[in-house]
Image (spheres, grey):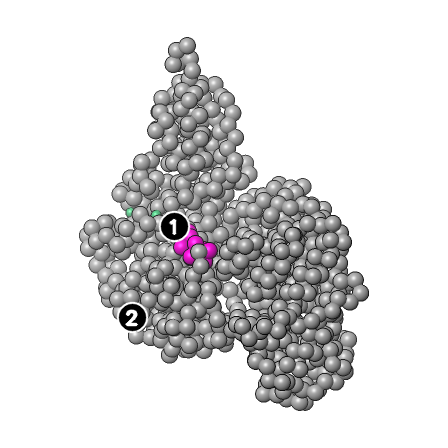
Amino acid sequence: MTAAARRVRTRARVTGTVQGVGFRPFVYRLAHEQGLAGWVLNDEHGVLLEVEGLAPELSHFFDRLSAEAPPLARVESVSPSATPVTGEPGFRIVTSVRVGDPDALIAADAATCEDCLAELRDPDDRRYRYPFTNCTNCGPRFTIVNGVPYDRPLTTMAAFTMCSECAREYEDPGDRRFHAQPNACPACGPAVRLRDAAGRGLAFFTDPSGEKRQASGGDPISALAARLSEGAIAAVKGLGGYHLVCDAANERAVAALRARKHREDKPFALMVADVASARRLVELDVSAETSLTGVSRPIVLAPRLPDAVIAPSVAPGAPELGVMLPYTPLHHLLLADFADFAGDALVMTSGNVSDEPIAYRDEDALERLSTIADLFLVHDRQIETRTDDSVVRSVTVGGRRRPLMLRRSRGYVPESLTLPIEAPRPLLACGAEQKATFCVARGERAWVGHHIGDLEHLATLTAYREGIGHFQRMFAVAPELVAHDLHPDYLSTQYALELDEVALVGVQHHHAHLAACLAEHGVTTPAVGAIFDGTGLGADGTVWGGELLVGDLRGYERAGWLWPLRMPGGAAAVRQPWRMAAAWLSEALGAEPPLPAALRATVSASDWNAVGRIARAPELSPVTSSIGRLFDAVGALCGAPARVSYEGQAAVELEALAWTAGDRASGGGYPFERAAGCVLDPRPAVRELVSELDRGVAAAVVSARFHAGVAAASVEAVTAIASARGLETAVLSGGVFQNRLLLERVAAGLDAAGLRVLVPQRLPPNDGGISFGQAAVAAAQ
Ligand SMILES: [Zn+2]
Ligand SMILES: [Zn+2]
């Protein structure tokens, strides 16, 4: 047989995250190395290629295709099929075609790679100190994309025409920037500009393309770093929106930022130059460090070190700090310049007032942030989709440390998730109200949108509507099936109900939590779920939140719940946790309990008595089985403020207290009873903890014993349900499981009892995961 006779040709479809990640140049290089002819192209379904050559070389090629894929690529499938030999010479990259439905997955934004950083720091490189340096392995993606296929004309880089140097890199298959859509340099790309709140230019490049990049007022980033070191507050345009930035060690600056932003207690995130700097602030385990340094670059919450040099106002009373590393060249330059003047940590918090969505359009940012920021570092690359920084913390589940997602946005969105049961029709799931996200799905593929925030402002609602529209276009989903929460007042529900000519599927809130976790793990069989959160509307019209559900993707049964009681004044109890303390005390001790010593400093006797009356009025006080509200009650008794500035604050402070108890909490958990069926009755625990507080036992000890009690009762109840029903899998989800102490204890207990424990992984346990659960339920039903 001659060599020519053994020549074969194969066509292959590659799916997954394969666009905008250097996949075509990688295929090109591979084909050259294996001596193959053919072509590769991007289309709406991913990457399509044909290779022709000797059979063993082809086989090598396909082995390497999956094994050596570029760092940002995620190959989900390669489907080869034989096709007639054409004898074409050489291998080429074909320009994108545009037909049919877009399926091709757009990558998430990725942190600056080492090669680009080296150029950024090299005075002889033409991209020396250029804040928009990127390549096929790094840079903006989702935040600049406005359509598919992912090509420059369909990004916000369309406004910039590449110079001849950049164009040469872009065209050269051997170059690191071959088809890097956001490719740019000082001569042809976006430029930064430092201005004051009135819009006057302070530092900018007058001749960016010139031989020496003349700057008026100095280099804008160095000029900003100098001003930050003097205590200024700046708004800095980043990848997914504006940050508010100041020196994290300067108490005056941080306190001023807190006051101007109307943010009372919520900790501010920090950005530090590198892992070594992070280690001076927080304790990092392997999992936390992996998250911190990964290409997604989330904010990592980690235990704060006692000697961390941070202004007190950064995170008042918080045992953890949120830390992230630079993820754009602009951030790298800013942190490096700032280190030359002052410290190594900057406050980097969302550019918004209080709970509004982060500002991302220039005019809007200048208007909304002009009362907060003294300075603005702006640039002329438009942000297509606003994305907040993602947030993770590390937890021990199943005997190993792993990340727990708390907010999924920049760096992760729009990676797709797989539905274990395919959606029969294109689908939209509208999510909940707090920490809102939406999800669009087609077939087995689902895309959960970026974190929108709480749907209570016009601005968040607008962002929500725009986000849904963008995802529907980007992933060609024209929904015929629309899933929503049962709560009629949620704006996400109202959005769903306003849609015409769609089939609606109402999904119970806690079932959605259960289904989200099951679906993420590809589980379609029934499991028992402990779904603990703040509030969600139950099927019986009461407010649920301490649910033991038995179910799968199709349906569920309420096997157990927390002892229900009235929530005095409904939503008012969320902001005033002492109201829940009043409710629980009257439940545990009798109708009109005296104002406990622990609350005398913060609550007046008349308020206490008034709330007692409100609690007895059914029309004012809905019945709830929420564990989140029980944590609030105990938090209030253990010293949380009378009025908290964000939902769950009392519970967060309660967990923080428990971590400080150490060996003192040796008395074990407070007792819960298990009433008829599987109703967790915490009244004995409440009685004992109140009497301990009255006797002067430290709040830290009380908190630790309370956590231990909830965990033990949960483990016992879940195990009992599992054994009665013959189930082997347990799911832990709901916002209360953001509490690391509780999550780890319950997971360890169930693990020891021989159950397989599932915890949300790529999605948060809080309401940010609800939309995916709704999608999974709607698809399965
Ligand atoms: Zn790069
Ligand atoms: Zn250029």
Q: Is residue 767 visible in this depiction of the protein?
A: no
Q: Principal SS element in the magenta part?
A: helix
Range shown magenta: 287-295
Question: CB of residue at label 1: within 8 Å of ligand 1?
Answer: yes
Q: What residue do we see at 49% from left, 34% from top?
A: 14
Residue 623, image x, y percentages: 74, 71
Work out whether 238 lies above or below 141.
below
Residue most extreme to the top:
1
- Locate residue 307, reporting x and y percent: 38, 73
Task: Looking at the picture, tell me which residue is in the foreground, 76 or 193.
Answer: 76
Vertical order, 154 against 628 (above or below): above
Amino acid carrying mark 2 in the image: Ala
Q: Is residue 589 left or right of residue 188?
A: right
Q: Do the residues labelled 1 and 2 touch (CB within 8 Å)?
A: no
Query: Horizontal placement of 424 versus 196: left or right?
Result: right
Indicate the amino acid at tag 1. Answer: Gly
Q: Is residue 217 magenta?
A: no
Residue designated by label 1? 139
Residue 237 at what x, y percent from top left? 39, 61
In this orientation, does residue 683 appear? yes
Split into 4 quadrants, where in the image is the N terminus?
A: top left
The residue mark sitting in front, 1 or 2, is 2
At 77% from the left edge and 75% from the top edge, which residue is drawn?
618
> What number of labels is visible?
2
Q: Mark 2 points at which residue?
A: 342
* Residue occupying the point 43% across, 45% down: 72
Vertical order, 83 against 732 (above or below): above
Left or right of 673? Residue 641 is: left
| Circle number at residue 406 | none
* Mark closer to the chain start, 1 or 2: 1
